[in-house]
Image (tube, rainbow, N blue to C red):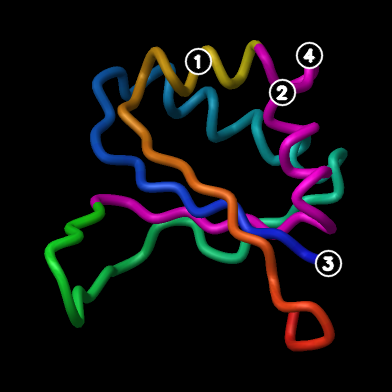
Amino acid sequence: MAAYLIVNIAAIHDDKTYAEYRARVNASVSAAGGEYLVRGGHVDVLEGDWRPNRVVVLRFPSAEAAKSWWASSEYAELKSMRQASAATEMILVEGMEGGTQ
């Protein structure tokens, strides 16, 4: 069952390092079977107090695939770059079994 990483890039404190991260991360995501569904764009808050800055949504074939990518040695350097250059919040959500994935 598909799983989705939902990320809020709350703040970027090192534009150069974050730009390098963005330039390199696509290959890592693709190699793990993931794909970007949302990568930035305008956000309209319809309800609640959540005020995300930059939203990123990725789809992976399964929660296990997403977790394996996130914890992999292949992503470790890139993860460190992201964490050093930006404040992020990230959650993993499983899709619906037998429904639209």
Q: Amino acid at mark 3?
A: Met
Q: Secondary structure at mark 2?
A: helix
Numbered circle sitting on residue 73? 4
Residue 3 x %, y %: 71, 59
Residue 71 got which mark? 2
Badge 4 marks a residue whose secondary structure is helix
Mark in the foreground, 1 or 4:
4
Q: CA distance from mark 1 to mark 4?
A: 13 Å
Tell me the amino acid under the disc marked 1: Met
Question: Which amino acid does the dot numbered 2 rest on?
Answer: Ala
The region drawn magenta spans 53-76
Up-down relation of residue 35 to residue 73 (above or below): below
Which residue is labeled 1 in the image?
81
Q: Residue at x 24, y 51 (%)?
A: 53
In whole angstroms, how far apart are the C-alphas of marks 2 and 1? 14 Å
Q: Nearer the viewer, residue 93 or 74?
A: 93
Question: Counting other residues with Cα less than 10 Å from the Cα at mark 2, is it few (<14), some (14-19), or many (20 or more)?
Answer: few
What residue lies at 74% left-to-right and 86% top-to-bottom?
100
Q: Is residue 99 left or right of residue 92?
A: right
Tell me how far mark 4 sits from mark 3, CA to CA.
24 Å
Q: Earlier in the sequence, mark 1 or mark 3?
A: 3
Mark 1 or 3: the one toward you: 3
Q: Which residue is mark 3?
A: 1
* Disc nearer the start of the sequence (4/3): 3
Q: Is residue 92 above or below residue 86?
A: below
Q: Is residue 69 magenta?
A: yes
